[in-house]
């Protein structure tokens, strides 16, 4: 049955353990001979032909998945992408029309803010595509096209497996549009498909090698009052997601920042003992970004921050400056978010559990917010 914890202490624990399947099931049946072909989009090439821009709309965790998706959508389709919170998009007279593809992302498919924004976009003549985890929900019914995530039912209020499934669906969509528009060569596309197919085993590896250690570490940090998260490029939305998850279920003040923004303000927050998670880009895949983030780590370390680095296996450059290193397997630069988020989900869950909180039903929050 859907409402069965299957032996796990919480739905959230069960759902984090299902992150590998959430990605694998979302990929299934959508790749043919190294190319992405999404069967639900058969006959809908017209949706992608004449567009000059893509706007991604969502709320909460889904909006952070959208921010990650922007990098892949722009890189593979060469169409400019904006990501907007649905409630901000809806009430500011946005410039949209028949050349705009509005991609909504919603686990439940019932979030009222997102639904209103989709209806509004449609009335204004935009094309609408829904990425949704719930068959037959309202938002997909109101959209021109649907790409379902196959994460399975998500019960815990804080979204975990749906988040990795949403990023996967956005990447598939980007590769599908890239093929239809001819913006991506078959060789390049095939390479990205290989990267995607390798993700589920890499997430499993994190769960096997790091979960117990991260939970212990989180328990040890249970009295922390404030945690900061820094990331750059695709690591930036992951920093935001790490902070959101901690706020949602552990009630600790947490904030995510773009690492490059540090010197423009947030570094003033750093005082001795302040825990800061840093998502470190791959030294192999993104040498320049890696060196920039390592110098950010040095800057905050010099001011006494306690640095917890989420870094690629084998990255030794972070060792002299990090108090703790949470390891993720090697992956191409755009694929790191699907891995880097896993330790952050485990950390938030571990810390809330250590505080004795109900991780599935955090105070004041609802799984699906069906009022504006
Ligand atoms: C609520 C939940 C969040 C979720 C957001 C969007 O605020 O508490 O976990 O990310 O809604 O939900 P949706 O179903 O639209 O993805």
Image (cartoon, helix red, strand yellow):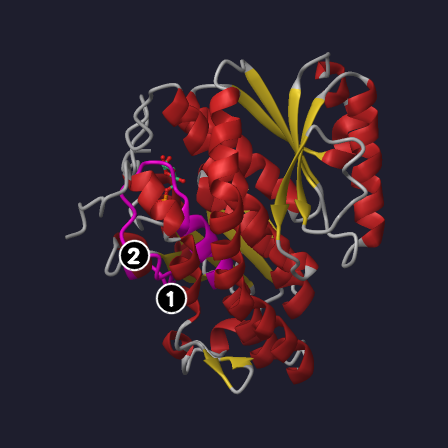
Circle number at residue 152: 2
Residue 111, x across and y down, in percent: 33, 42
Disc 1 marks which residue?
Answer: 25
Q: Secondary structure beneath disc 2?
A: loop
Q: Quadrant of residue 165?
A: bottom left
Foreground residue among 84 and 226: 226
Q: Does the segment drawn in magenta span residue 149?
A: yes
Q: Is residue 37 left or right of residue 301?
A: left
**Where residue 357 sits: x, y (%)?**
33, 22
Earlier in the chain: of badge 1 and badge 2, it is 1
User: Of residues 205 and 157, which is closer to you in this image?
Assistant: 205
Please give the name of the residue rendered at 80% of the width and 17% of the height, measured from the top-left corner: 303
Residue 147 is situated, as x and y percent measured from the top left of the image, at 39, 65
> Residue drawn at (45%, 60%), measured in percent from left and top?
125
- Nearest the viewer among 326 and 253 is 326
Span shown in magenta: 141-170
Residue lying furthest bottom: 33
Q: What element carries label 1?
A: helix
Quadrant observed for ligand 1 in the rendered image? top left
The answer to whether residue 109 shows anywhere in this view is yes
């Amino acid at each position: 049955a859907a409402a069965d914890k299957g032996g796990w202490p919480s739905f959230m624990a069960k759902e984090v353990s299902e992150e590998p399947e959430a990605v694998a099931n979302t990929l299934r049946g959508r790749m043919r001979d190294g190319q992405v072909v999404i069967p639900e989009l058969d006959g809908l090439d017209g949706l992608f032909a004449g567009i000059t821009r893509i706007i991604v709309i969502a709320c909460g965790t889904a909006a952070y998945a959208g921010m990650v998706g922007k990098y892949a959508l722009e890189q593979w389709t060469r169409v400019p992408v904006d990501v907007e919170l649905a409630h901000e998009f809806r009430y500011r007279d946005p410039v949209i029309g028949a050349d705009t593809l509005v991609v909504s992302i919603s686990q439940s498919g019932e979030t009222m803010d997102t639904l209103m924004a989709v209806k509004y976009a449609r009335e204004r003549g935009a094309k609408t595509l829904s990425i949704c985890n719930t068959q037959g929900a309202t938002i997909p019914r109101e959209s021109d096209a649907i790409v379902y995530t196959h994460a399975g039912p998500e019960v815990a209020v804080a979204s975990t497996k749906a988040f990795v499934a949403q990023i996967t669906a956005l990447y598939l969509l980007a590769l599908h549009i890239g093929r239809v528009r001819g913006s991506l060569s078959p060789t390049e596309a095939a390479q990205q498909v290989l990267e995607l197919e390798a993700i589920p085993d890499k997430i499993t590896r994190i769960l096997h090698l790091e979960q117990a250690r991260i939970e212990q570490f989180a328990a040890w940090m249970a009295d922390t009052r404030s945690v900061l998260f820094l990331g750059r490029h695709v690591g930036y939305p992951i920093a935001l997601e790490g902070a959101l998850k901690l706020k949602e279920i552990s009630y600790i003040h947490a904030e995510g920042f773009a690492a490059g923004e540090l010197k423009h303000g947030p570094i003033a927050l750093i005082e001795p003992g302040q825990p800061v998670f840093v998502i470190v880009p791959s030294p192999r895949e993104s040498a320049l970004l890696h060196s920039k983030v390592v110098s950010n780590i040095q800057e905050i370390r010099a001011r006494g921050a306690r640095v917890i680095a989420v870094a690629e296996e084998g990255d030794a450059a972070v060792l002299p400056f990090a108090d703790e290193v949470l390891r993720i397997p090697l992956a191409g630069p755009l694929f790191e978010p699907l891995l880097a988020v896993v330790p952050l989900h485990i950390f938030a869950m571990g810390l809330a559990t250590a505080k004795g909180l109900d991780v599935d039903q955090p105070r004041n929050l609802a799984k699906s917010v069906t009022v504006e």
